[in-house]
Image: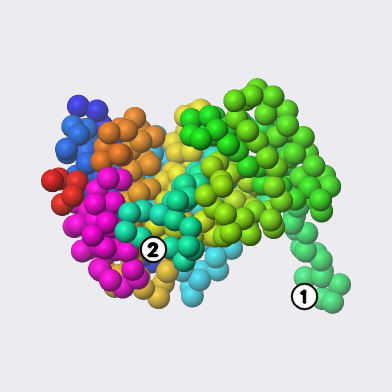
Amino acid sequence: MTTHKIALIPGDGIGVDVTDAAIEIATAAARRFGFTLATETFPWSCDHYLATGRMMPEDGIETLRGFDAIYLGAVGWPATVPDSVSLHGLLLPIRKAFAQYANIRPHRLLKGVEGPLRSDGFDILCIRENTEGEYSGAGGRVHQGTPGEVAIQTSVFTRMGVERILRFGFEQARARRGHLTSVTKSNAQQYSMVFWDEVTREVAADYPDVSVEPMHIDAMAARMVMAPESLDVIVASNLFGDILTDLGAAIQGGLGFAASANINPDRSAPSMFEPVHGSAPDIAGKDIANPIAAIWSAAMMLDHLGEAEAAAAILAAIEAATAQGIGTRPGSHSTSAITQAVKAALEA
Ligand code: IPM
Ligand code: MN
């Protein structure tokens, strides 16, 4: 029997609630499809920071390297640890250290879920660059606290980084409806985004079967609201992709439905799976967080691990529940009620 070694980092707030739900469902799927998940839980979180002075131990990355995948709930508890500290101590270094350069986020309406738009026939796959760009961490501050204070945060776009994310996007588009929209802002950002457009054209030459269009980020935001059904695969830089995927979450009914996978495509290191939503301190521990985004992210993890049938069964079980209205509206059902409905559908 195949065993997949999974590192669990529930993290903070509702990250803990939804990780429990997601792993309960993933484990039920493993039982049904004849494989095993060997999980090990790491308490790395803001509480861990308060107790130890670090979000994860110094050898945290080396510890994670030995796993087949990482499942993360959410990170952040700004009342005690600034987000700039907690995220740079855990989530962001993992994405970079393991070259999880493709952040994949599907945006479509699950059965029974009503989005805020009239349009309901969209199916968008957002591919967000996940290791460089606006998140490179290049910059600094000088003359702090004086009127002459300066803060610089520089975007870094490398040929390797831009080319590989575009190539990944083209591959996804080829396997779907054959259309790729490359998100850019080359009218204003004359270095980085003109470069991005050039690389898009170069890579496009290898994919004559995929139709490609560049689109400015501002127009793209409007299009996702006005005509989301006209989109297939979107490729965007780190920050552009971050912003567009919250918009994507909104049009699919909310952050409770937005799943994500941080993928290392060459499999030289583990990939990481997490819902798009954050730790939501105001509803933490109350059994009211929607676990669907987290469960869907667990399905993406199983798919990545080669358990495509189990992944598809989880998605079908989620939709069997939502089609009956379970978990489709904020507050309609508890975290555990939604989880049990998905589990029942999975085991039926
Ligand atoms: C996300 C989140 C993170 C990001 C934050 C928490 C640093 O918003 O995964 O979308 O910006 O990448
Ligand atoms: Mn985000």
Q: Earlier in the sequence, mark 1 or mark 2?
A: 2
Looking at the picture, does residue 15 appear above or below residue 138? below
Task: Please provide the residue range marked out in magenta.
Answer: 314-343
- Residue 332 is situated, as x and y percent measured from the top left of the image, at 28, 71
Camera-nearest residue between 248 and 143: 248
Residue appearing at x 18%, y 57% in the figure: 340
Residue named by callout 2: 114
Residue appearing at x 69%, y 24% in the figure: 205
Q: Is residue 79 left or right of residue 183?
A: left
Callout 1 amino acid: Gly
The verdict on label 2 being within 8 Å of ligand 2 is no
- Density class for disc 1 (Cα within 10 Å; few <14, some 14-19, many ≥20) is few
Which label lies toward us, 1 or 2? 2
Q: Can residue 27 be seen in this snapshot? A: yes
Residue appearing at x 70%, y 34% in the figure: 200
Looking at the picture, does residue 161 appear above or below residue 183? above
Q: Is residue 8 left or right of residue 155?
A: left
